[in-house]
Structure formats: C-alpha cells, structure tokens
Amino acid sequence: MISNLRKAVRLPQPRRRGVDLSHPARSPLGTAVVNCAVYVDGVRQEGDHPADVAIHRVRKTGRGFVWIGLHEPSEKEFAGIVELFGLHPLAVEDAVYAHQRPKLEHYDDSLFTVFKTVRYVEHDRLTDTSEVVETGEIMVFTGTDFVITVRHGGHGSLGPLREQLECVPEQLALGPSAVLHAVADLVVDDYLDVASAVQDDIDEVESEVFSIRGSGGAGRIYQLKRELLELKRAVAPLDRPMQELATQSMSEVDPRIKTYFRDVADHLDRVTEQITSFDELLNSILQAHLAQVTVAQNEDMRRISAWVAILAVPTMVCGVYGMNFDHMPEKHWTFGYPLVMTVTVALCWLIHRGFKRNGWL
C-alpha cells in the first residue's frame, strides 16, 4: 500500500520551484491561508472550502482529514483556526512568532512539530561576508483528522509537495501522519542538498589555501564556519524528534509510517556526521592557513635579516672612514679608496653567497 511512499516524496529534483503566494489560485482563502483541502481515501475532494466547513464535513462522515496550509499568519488570522481545532496556546504562540528550535511536543490529542528549513544561497565567489545558508521554519500541527502546516520564510514552499502527494493517493490514505512524514523528508532532503553545496565551497577554499599563491583568507574560513553553525542549529536539534516519531507509539502517527520516519532519521544522522566532518576540516584548513602565514612571515624576516647583515658591512666601513681623524690607515694613500671599496664589495658578496646557499635569500 505504501510501496510508492518514498517515490512520491523523494523526487530526484535538485531545485524546487517556489510557489507564488500572491497568485489567486494559490491563495483563494486569504493572505495567510495558502490552501485548505479535504482528503478522503487519499483523494482530494473537489472545491476549496473554509476551514470550518472542511472539518465539519470530515467529522460528519468520519472519513478523511483536512490539510490546511498557512504562510506567516498573524495572531488575528490564526485565531479562528485555533478555536476550531482546539490548538494549545503555547504551540500557537510558537507558530505565529516563529524563531523556534526544531522540536516535537505533545498537546492532548495533537502533535506540534517544528522544522528548520534551509536554503543554499548562490554566490559567484565566497567572500568574508557571503551568506551561504538561509533558514526558515515549518510548523506542523498533526491530529487524527487534520494537519495544519505553518511556514515562515521566503523558501521551503509546500505547494509542490502537496501536488506530489496528491499523485499518490495510497500515501495520503494513511492520514495526517503521512503528510508529517513527507514534510520531514522534504526538509531533511534539503539539508542533504545544502550540505553538498557547502562542501563545494569548502573544497574551493581548501584548494586556494594549499595553492602556490595561498590566497585563501582566514576571513572566508571563519565565514564558512559561521554559516556551518547556522546549518548545525537547524539539523542537530531535530534528531530527538525524529527518533521519537520513529520509535514511540503515538495515536496521531500511523504505525505503518514509523519505518519511513526511521529512514528520515538515518538521513538526518548522515547530515549531522557531514556537518561534524566539515567543521573538523575547516579547523584543519584554518590551522594550515595560519601555519602558512607564520612560515611566510618567518621567510620575510630571514630575508630582511640577511639584507641587514649585508648592508652592515658598508655601513661600518663608511662609518669608520667618515670619522674626522688625521691619522687613519690608507687615508692619504692613492689606492686607499679603491681598496676599501673592493674589500667592502667582496665582503658583501661573500655574505650574500652564504645566505643564498643557506636559503635565506
């Protein structure tokens, strides 16, 4: 029955098109409600109904569920839905004001799940101030006969996901938990895509650090570490909620979905391991860069010291013969000046040759 579950959710598309929320076909129910539909046996019922009509229809027949999608609702816009579905005030506050860590909370007969969405920010060249990772949020209220998704941010649209799920009615027939799994799988897939893109940036910086020019600056490495930390804040806290969904018995989650939550948890572990390895690699690159800077500075100091030693010879000779004494060696000798200059040049050449042989010049 669910053999095509992953096929519907994990389509091999590197980029997903965003949904235009201003389009009347996408927002027929208001500025915050993007979509509201009734699904019976996995099939979307005709018509776009208000939330109260949709849930009344489901509860009257005892079949199907309602899926409501919202985008950055205000407290006032969300108030009607809160009262209709009996959502917990604490969860509602988190859903309206966002900026939450990924988590899973139980409220009476519903689940409240928070996901951090991520998007890779394209850039021609990584700089000290380049934004690499952009984050948003998706909150999911899951009940026995409803699922409410609340999205914050300019990316992570669920429109394409809804259309994909509607092509596989046997998946939606499993109820709201199938939608919860699909959202989780979508979010974690984006983590994998972003991690792969960040790896390309790390490889670029690593290549430049170990190139002959050694042009990879510490500023860019620190910037990558900051962006990697942003990704880690989205990924790491989600591990516990995924483990709970995969292992614990919940009335809101169909037992047949648990296997697929375990698969999502495995992929999440893979991303976590990638982030850890990226952080360690960046530490190594930074240490190598600092070591290169130290070596370059030492080489510069050796060159400067060598030239100072060479110039010390003529400085000393000129200093001696610049003193105003009448009785000085070779002062009144015809070949005194050529002899002193010859000896000075010879000494400078010998010192230069010695430093050159030792690699100081």
Image (tube, rainbow, N blue to C red):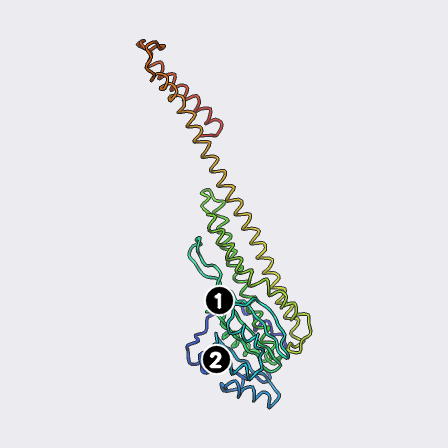
Horizontal and vertical percent position of residue 332: 31, 9
Secondary structure under the numbered disc 1 in the rendered image: loop
Using residue 210 as the reference point, say whether residue 111 is left or right of it: right
Using residue 228 as the reference point, say whether residue 110 is left or right of it: right
Horizontal and vertical percent position of residue 251: 66, 78
Residue occupying the point 61% across, 71% down: 104
Q: Nearer the viewer, mark 2 or mark 1?
A: 2
Secondary structure under the numbered disc 2 in the rendered image: helix
Q: Is residue 196 above or below residue 97?
A: above
| Quarter occupied by residue 168 | bottom right
Q: Nearer the viewer, residue 136 or 266?
A: 136
Question: In the rendered structure, which amino acid carries the disc numbered 1?
Answer: Arg
Q: Which residue has dot 2 on it?
A: 76
Q: Which circle's residue, 2 or 1, is located before the other in the chain?
A: 1
Q: Residues within 10 Å of mark 2 (few under 14, many from 20)?
A: few
Q: Is residue 329 above or below residue 171?
A: above
Question: In the rendered structure, which amino acid carries the disc numbered 2?
Answer: Lys
Separation of marks 2 and 1 at Cα, in angstroms: 34 Å
Horizontal and vertical percent position of residue 312: 41, 23
Looking at the figure, which quarter contains the N terminus? bottom right
Residue 15 badge? 1
Residue occupying the point 45% across, 35% down: 300
